[in-house]
Image: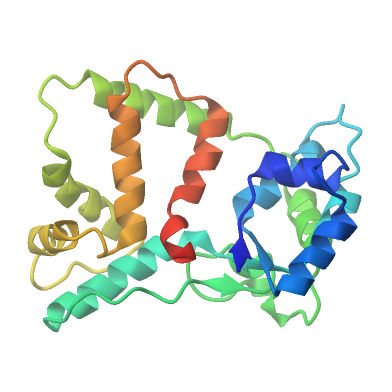
Amino acid sequence: MRIFLDTRDLINLLEGRGPCSVDYFRQWLRNGGHKLVLNLTVIFEISAPLSDPSSKTVVTRLLNDLERLPHVFINDAQIQPKEVESAIHLYSEGREYVPIVPPYVDRLDKAIPISGPPHTDIYINFGLAETVYTIWWVDRNAFRWPEEQVKRLLSGIALDRSMPNAPTVAQHFREKLRRDLKLYNIPHPQSGVDDLADWIYETPTRCPAVRIGYEVYHQIRRNVGDQPAASDFGDFAHVQCLPMWI
């Protein structure tokens, strides 16, 4: 079984504030043949003290203890592009959608690029702490909350909420897919974007990660009584992984 823990629960476990010790949890995972699932967002949140000069957290110890747990990484940045590429191929051949192979990898550096292997793939051994510190040496602020990006996201939600005649979620999915194709540098399908978008949206099991992320966002947009916090966007990044667990 693959187990994905909330970052706060994982940090509490590593710092000795969890319901059991790290050693006990490690043995429990091994005895049951289970693996902890980690992604880039979780590792960045654990490593955040590196970008805080006042922090006394020993990040290296946390990362080393984490790496000793049975685990696997998931490159969640590849999930949606792979789903869209698969949908284009299958739709063009008149076949039903087939779920993608979840992009599980064995190292953090392989869980970063949207396509292709990382440049560090040439290293035989490239441990978790070493990878994190390599990123940190390149950019000492790498693990800080991206404040400007969060402001843009909050502003975008506010603008969407203020639209007097917003299109239906099903109608807007066409525009969402156009933006995804541009974002992921995927050529437009010969059949046209609208027909493909309508086919994908017709059934939730077609591009499920794309769909669940899209629907969750619009549920947030509709909940006008709630003001999202910066940390909510970290949690939102995990939503697209949900279909991979099934």
* Number of numbered tags placed on the structure image: 0
**Percent position (x, y) of residue 2?**
60, 66
Q: Is residue 142 visible?
A: no
Q: Quadrant of the N terminus?
A: bottom right
What colour scheme does the image use?
Answer: rainbow
Residue placed at 49% from the left, 63% from the top? 245
Residue placed at 31% from the left, 28% from the top? 221
Q: Is residue 43 visible?
A: yes
Q: Quadrant of residue 86?
A: bottom left
As drawn, which residue projects farthest toward the top?
A: 225
In the picture, measured across the screen, residue 165 lies left or right of residue 11, that is left
**Percent position (x, y) of residue 171?**
11, 44
Q: Quadrant of residue 159?
A: top left
Q: Is residue 198 above or below residue 215?
A: below
Q: Quadrant of the C terminus?
A: bottom left
Q: Nearer the viewer, residue 130 or 246?
A: 246
**Percent position (x, y) of residue 177?**
23, 54
**Percent position (x, y) of residue 95?**
16, 81
Q: Is residue 181 above or below residue 151?
A: below
Residue placed at 12% from the left, 37% from the top? 168
Residue placed at 9% from the left, 58% from the top? 194
Q: Nearer the viewer, residue 148 or 46?
A: 46
Q: Quadrant of residue 196?
A: bottom left
In the picture, measured across the screen, residue 91 lies left or right of residue 138, that is left
Q: Nearer the viewer, residue 25 or 98?
A: 25
Q: Nearer the viewer, residue 175 or 41?
A: 41
In the picture, measured across the screen, residue 12 lies left or right of residue 89, that is right
